[in-house]
Image (cartoon, rainbow, N blue to C red):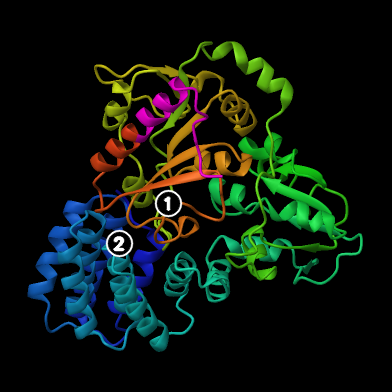
Amino acid sequence: MAADPALAERLAAQLAADPTAEARDAEVNQVLARAWRSFYRGDIRRAEAVFRQQATHAEDVPGAPATALLGLALIAHWEGRSAEAADLAEQVCALSPNYATPHYALGEIEWARGNPEAAEAALRRALAIAPSHIDAQIVLGNLALERGAYREGWSLLEARTLRRGYDSWANTFTSYQPWAGEPLDGRTILLPSEQGLGDQLQVARYAPILAARGGRVIVETRPPLARLFRTLAGVEQVITTDEVKARRGPPWRPSVEPIDVWAYPMSLPGVFDTTLETIPPCPYVRADPELVDAWRPRIRPGPALKVGLVWAGNPRSPTPGGRAGWGDSLRHLSLEALAPLGRVPGVTLYSLQVRRRDPAPPGLTVLDLAPWLDDFAETAAAIANLDLVISVDTSVANLVGALGAPGWILLPRPCEWRWLRDGDTTPWYPSLRLFRQERRGEWGPVVERVAAELGKLVAERGAGMRPALGVA
């Protein structure tokens, strides 16, 4: 489990650096800096040993105890020892009350513990100290969105564009005007690729709206989404990130016709002042009919309910605060954990899982479709041949919703803002039904509920009733 190096660097700089330190102080700070490097490289035990030593043996070095305790707090946080993490973070806040980062860290920890009010309070304290604290703005924005405060959330989420990585995009488009919602009147607008595949799927619904309002829309995306995004109504061109990289030159210019304006796709909900009541409807992408026909022979004929499964996402998926790796450890489960679904009669299970091969436990038969799932266009065609998809929070869950297909989504606690804080539905994807953890990390009761509902569907189908697979 690795932490974000940029975060580690910021923490070390804010809490350990002391330009007036003498030799011993400098030595201690170097030791702590090495510990942070071990931390973000994944050598957690080595980092923990150093942090514990320095927390008690470097009391007279400015900032050292707070830095060490914060390291211990974040280790406890990422390892799921949330009460310990919160206690340590509160100690750091007491030691360094005028630093924003400890309050930000406490906010993330309280969010993960399922205490959103305490998380918001800590994050607002961080921003009172340092209004430009990027991570605190982003996490507070996620919290605002998950409780439906969209105007505040969209505004706060714009802080993401100040992170490293976005700088190159901003520099790329300095000769083009950023779009701020004015009439397009036939002008060409480019939507560059940003964030994860699921995020891109969620906000792709805004591209047809831009086209309907007079824009000539060009979408850049990652290769797995390109063919699917060519089904977006009104989009004139879809280019891939690989194509863009291959055609770079000094100075870099997009390999498309002249661009008039551009906009980050994840900024479009804010530009359109999207509320819970005005979310653009589904479906907005579709499966290619020829691919749907090509997939039909791969699905067993017969009366059994045909159910696709996805039990894990991208291992590099970030948390709302931006750390890679930890987010997926919360939201995925093992194929073995889905064994109760194999006990439901009248169901044929199909794996839509890619980049992962879990052995099926005894009693669970899952037919593997992964060899043919080259991109999301293929996955969409496979889904069109199934009755239902059961998935954890992954890009496939977003795809099912974007297609308007029936899906049951298994959610961790806490979860991404698009699923809101409570309830079994989301206005972003009306065809999906949500199954939430009651307690963080406990998937067993969730899977048992899903198995029971699956059994009801089979019974309804056997009785000649039309089963309500989704919620729409």
Report which residue position mark 1 lands on.
Answer: 424
Q: Residues within 10 Å of mark 1 (few under 14, many from 20)?
A: some
Residue drawn at point x = 53 percent, y = 11 percent:
301
Amino acid residing under circle 1: Asp
Among numbered discs 1 and 2, the one appearing first in the sequence: 2
Report which residue position mark 2 lands on.
Answer: 112
Q: Residues within 10 Å of mark 2 (few under 14, many from 20)?
A: many
Horizontal relation, residue 33 to residue 399: left or right: left
Q: Which quadrant would residue 259 be assigned to in this image?
A: bottom right
Horizontal relation, residue 180 to residue 151: left or right: right
Q: Nearer the viewer, residue 427 or 80?
A: 427
Q: Which quadrant would residue 215 be assigned to in this image?
A: bottom right
Q: Quadrant of the C terminus?
A: top right
Residue 471: say if magenta.
yes
Image location (x, y in percent) of residue 51: 16, 65
Residue drawn at point x = 44 percent, y = 20 percent:
462
Amino acid residing under circle 2: Ala
Residue drawn at point x = 69 percent, y = 41 percent:
285
Residue drawn at point x = 53 percent, y = 64 percent:
164
The residues bearing labels 1 and 2 have C-alpha atoms spaced at a distance of 20 Å
Image location (x, y in percent) of residue 366: 39, 19
Magenta stretch? Answer: 453-472
Q: Nearer the viewer, residue 61 or 375?
A: 375
**Residue 62 visible in the snapshot:** no
